[in-house]
Amino acid sequence: QVQLVESGGGLVQPGGSLRLSCAASGSRFRANAMGWFRQAPGKQRELVARVFSGGTTNYADSVKGRFTISRDDAKNTVYLQMNSLKFEDTAVYYCKAEYLVLGAYWGQGTQVTVSS
C-alpha cells in the first residue's frame, strides 16, 4: 500500500514563499508521475503542477513563473516551491502519485493560507 506524507503547509503573507514536500513509501516501483493539486473552499480540485519520471513538467497557468515542482527519486519525494504567493493560492494542497501498475494515490492534504 502506497502512502504519501505531505508537509510544509502553513500561513504566509502575500508575496511570501513556502515549500511543500511529499514523501512516498510502500512501493518498490517508481511513480510515473507525481504532482500537486489544490482545492479551495467551494471549488473543484485542480492541478497545480506535475512532474513525470523523465523530468517533464507541466503547470497550471495561474502558477507559472511562481511555482516550481521537482522530484528526488532517491528519496521518493516531490517538492513544490511556491514563491510570490497570492491570496488566491489559499487552498488545501494534495500530493498525488501515479503508478503504471499500482494506479494513483493521494496524500491527506496540507493547508496553505495566504493572508495579511
Image: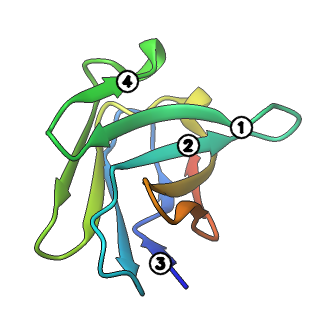
Give whichever of discs 2 and 1 has the lower sequence position. 2
Q: How many marks?
A: 4
**Residue 3, x across and y down, in percent:** 51, 81
Note whether 58 is above or below 108 in the view shown: above
Identify the coloring: rainbow
Local packing at callout 3 (Cα closer than 10 Å; few below 14, some 14-19, many 20+) is: some
Q: Check disc 1 and report the residue beneath it.
A: 45
| Quarter in which the C terminus is drawn | top right
Dot 4 amino acid type: Tyr
Q: CA distance from mark 3 to mark 2?
A: 14 Å
Q: Earlier in the sequence, mark 2 or mark 4?
A: 2
Residue tagged 3: 5
Residue at the spot of label 2: 37
**Alpha carbon separation for disc pair 2 and 1:** 6 Å
Task: Establish if 53 lies above or below 48.
Answer: below
Secondary element at tag 2? strand
Mark 1–mark 4 Cα distance, whole angstroms, equals 14 Å
Which residue is labeled 4 in the image? 59
In this rendered view, identify the residue nearer to me: 27 or 76.
27
